[in-house]
Image (cartoon, rainbow, N blue to C red):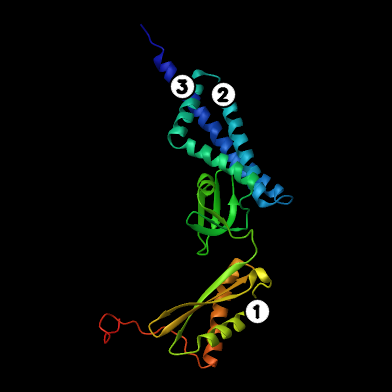
Amino acid sequence: METSLPVTIIEFLKMAGLAVVIATIGYALAELLLIRLIKGALSRFIDSTWVDFLAGLVRLALFLLTGKIIIDITGTTGALVVIVTAVTGAFAIGSERLASDIVSGVKLMFLRYYDVDEYVTLGNYFGKVIEINMSATSLLTIDKDKIIIPNSEAVNGTLINHSRVPGYRIKIRIPVRGKHDRVVVLRVLEETVSQFEGRLDGDAYRPVVIFDGIGADTNFYEVWTYVAKWPDTVYKASDLRLKLVQVLEARGITVGLAPVYALNPGTKV
């Protein structure tokens, strides 16, 4: 008695191959053509955060449409098996996580915890937000690395937005060696930081000088002030540190760390 099994297998393979071809074409159209066109058109009218979000919705709609086309064209049990297998495999390799990321992406779009071009700390990562899509947030770090963080991690973990409240703190610790008048040092530091160009004005950003502690032949002072933009903290901190040291040394005050001694006072380490 002849069996139809070979015919069934051939038919299944044909439908599977056709499904792969259609899926490939759908993916290429979505990623390489339509999404780029949509981003280019929308970026002229709305901010980049919503551009990425809407592009993600279009991408999802195109993927669903591709799935429907596969079913309509193949129209066989074999095609349905292929689709069911693909869905099952997707869940096996982490679609539950992907679904969580997408839900978190929608939450980010509406609650606006952060926007593109803002500086944030997400978990252990600090950087400038350069993209927010349906599943992930991309940061550009100070080392010029691109870090992609799943939206579920961004929303459910520790999130600090450094850009929503104006001002970034510069904190500088100054060691002063030898015997000296601490009150004079405090006054000199206060006067210098108060005249520092580039700091923010106003009571909320008033500079602070703290007597921070006593070491071996060394006293420590800490100076706080605020600048407008985060990248400025790197350069302004260096400028302020140099200015503070120059003013103290001009007053005859020695700046620098004292030698550190081991248990044996005669041995330097």
* Up/down of 228 relative to 73, above or below: below
Position of residue 73 measured from the top left corner of the image (x, y, whole percent): 58, 23
Q: Amino acid at mark 3?
A: Phe
**Does residue 32 appear to the left or right of 181 in the view shown?**
right
Considering every residue shown, the one lying at the far right of the view is 45
As drawn, the residue found furthest toward the top would be 1
Residue labelled with disc 3: 12
User: In the rendering, at what x and y percent does residue 89 appear?
Assistant: 44, 32
Give the residue at mark 1: 197
Which residue occupies 46% across, 27% down?
85
Horizontal and vertical percent position of residue 226: 61, 71
Are there few (<14), some (14-19), or many (20+) residues within 10 Å of tag 2? some
- The mark nearer the N terminus, 2 or 3, is 3
Disc 1 residue type (three-letter): Glu
Q: CA distance from mark 3 to mark 1?
A: 74 Å
Q: Nearer the viewer, residue 138 or 30?
A: 138
Outermost residue toward the left in this view: 264
Q: Which residue is identified by label 2?
A: 71
Give the CA distance from mark 1 to mark 2: 67 Å
87 vs 37, nearest the viewer: 87
Q: Nearer the viewer, residue 116 or 41?
A: 116
Give the answer, above or below, for where 250 lies relative to 196: below
